[in-house]
Amino acid sequence: MPKSKSLFETAKRVIPSGVTSPVRYYEPYPFFAKKASGSSIWDVDGNKYIDFCYGYGAMLLGHRREEVVSAVRRQLDVGTLYGTPTDLEVDLADLLRRAYPSMSKVRLVNTGSEATMTAIRLARGITKKKKIIKFEGCYHGAHESMLVKAGSGSAHNGISVSDGVPQDFTKNTIVVQYNNIEQLDEVISKNKDVAGVIVEPVLGNMGLILPQKNYLSEMRKLTKQHDIPLIFDEIITGFRMSLGGAQQYFGIKPDITTLGKSLSNGFVISAVGGRRDIMDQLAPGGKVYEASTFAGNPISVAAATASVKTMKKLQNKLYPKLEKYCGKLSKAIGEIAHDFKIPHQVNSISSMFQIFFTDVPVVDYATSKRSDTKKFHALFSHLLKKGIFIAPSQYETGFFSLAHTESDLSKTTSAYEYALKMVKS
Ligand SMILES: *Cc1c(COP(=O)(O)O)cnc(C)c1O
C-alpha cells in the first residue's frame, strides 16, 4: 500500500503517532481511507474491503445510508448551527424516549465521553455521594474518572492509566470484576459512599464479553436495594442489540442511559437520558452543570432523527437479519478454528462477534487478557490482505450492519478460513 505508507510518514510529522485516535494505529501502518459505501470501504491505494470495524460500531445501517445522507443534505441548505433551540431536537428527544422508556428526559451531547461524564456527574449530583463503581475492561470514554484500572488484591480503588491524570482524580472510582455479582455485592455493602454503578451491559471494549445469566438483573436488584443509580452505557449496544438497546433485549430498566455510535449512523452526536428526577438536576433548572456549543447541532440531529426513524421502520427486518448473519459467521469461525485445532473462543450476540485465542471461556478482563494477541494481529493482517477489515485490536469487536450481503458473508467466511490457516502455521 504505497500511498498509505507514504501518507503515514507525513502524518507522523504533523499528527502525534500519525493517528487521530490511538486504536487506529497498527503495525506497520494503517490504511488511509478514501471512500465508503454500504458494506465497503476503499483505501487510497484503490483496495476495497468489506467493513466489520464500521466506525467502531457506529454504522449500523451501513455507509452512506440514503435516508441519513439526504436528511443531512436538506439540513445543509437551511443552516448548520443556530445557538438556539430547534424543533428538530424536540422531535429527536421524543423519538428516543419512545424507544427507551427508562429515559423520561434526554439531553443531547456530542461524544460518548461527554455523555458518560454527564451521567456520572448526575449520579453524584443526585446522591450527594462520591464513589463510582466501574467494571474492569469496560470503556466509558477518555475522561479523568474513567481512565482507571483495578488496584491490586482486594483494594478496588482505581489506579490512573494515563499520565496527566493524578491519583486525586481516580481515587473515587472503584473497579470491580465483570460477571462477579458477589464482589459487587460485597463492595456495595461495605461502602456507604457509592454514587453510581456504570456498566456496558454487553462488554464491547475488551473484545466482546457477554453478561452471564441473571448478572444484569442481579445488578439491577442490588443497586435498587441500596438506592444507587445504575447507569447503562449503551453507546455500543443502543440501537444495535434492538431498537431499545440492551435494556430492551434483557428487559432491565436502568436509571440513566447513554447512547452514541449507532444513534446517528456516522455523525457526531450522543445522548444522556434517564429518570425525570435525575435529569431535572441539569442546569439551568438544576445544579449539575453540563454544556456545549455544538450540542444538538442541526446536522447531527437531522442524521440521528433519520437514523432512528429508519431503524424503527425496518426493525422487524433489521434485527433478525443482523442476528442471522452474525450467528452464521460466528459459527463458521468457531468450526474453522476447531478444524485447525487452534485454541479459541468465539463470543457473539446479536450483531457483534469476536474470536479469542485461548482455551478458557472469556467472561471478564482477566480471561480476555489470556488471548494470544500475536495470533490476533496475524489474523487481522491476513484478513486485511483478503479484503476484510475488522478492528485491528483483540480488545475490540466485529460489527455487522444492514448493508452486509450474502456474498459478503461467504467472502468473509473464506477469508477467515485462509487467515486462520495462516495463524495456525
Ligand atoms: C465508544 C464508547 C464510548 C466513548 O464514546 P466517544 O464518542 O468515543 O467519546 C463510551 N462508552 C462506550 C461503551 C463506547 O463504546
Image (cartoon, rainbow, N blue to C red):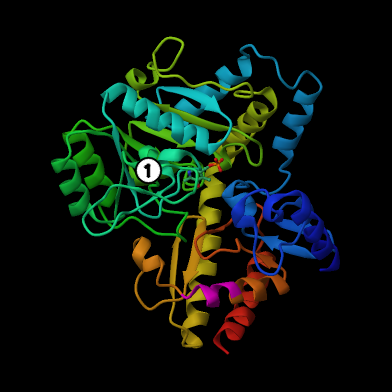
Amino acid residing under circle 1: Gln
Q: Which residue is mark 1?
A: 167
Front-lying residue, 315 or 258: 258
The percent coordinates of residue 162 (x first, y second) are 48, 49
- The residue lying at 56 percent from left, 48 percent from top is 317
Q: Quadrant of residue 389?
A: bottom right
- Judged from the image, the secondary structure of the residue bearing numbered disc 1 is helix
Asked whether residue 89 is in view, the answer is yes
Q: Is residue 365 above or below residue 190?
A: below
Q: Quadrant of residue 421?
A: bottom right
Q: Quadrant of residue 379?
A: bottom right
Asked whether residue 43 is in view, the answer is no
Q: Is residue 178 magenta?
A: no
- The residue lying at 27 percent from left, 23 percent from top is 128
Quadrant into which the N terminus falls? bottom right
The percent coordinates of residue 289 (x first, y second) are 45, 19
Q: Main secondary structure of the magenta part?
A: helix
- The residue lying at 52 percent from left, 60 percent from top is 324
- The residue lying at 45 percent from left, 14 percent from top is 283
In the figure, is residue 19 to the left or right of 148?
right
Quadrant into which the C terminus falls? bottom right
Q: Is residue 6 above or below residue 338?
A: above
Q: Is mark 1 within 8 Å of ligand 1?
A: no
The percent coordinates of residue 398 (x first, y second) are 55, 60
Q: Which residues are magenta?
A: 372-377
Q: Is residue 373 magenta?
A: yes
In the figure, is residue 300 to the left or right of 93?
right
Q: Is residue 329 above or below residue 72?
A: below
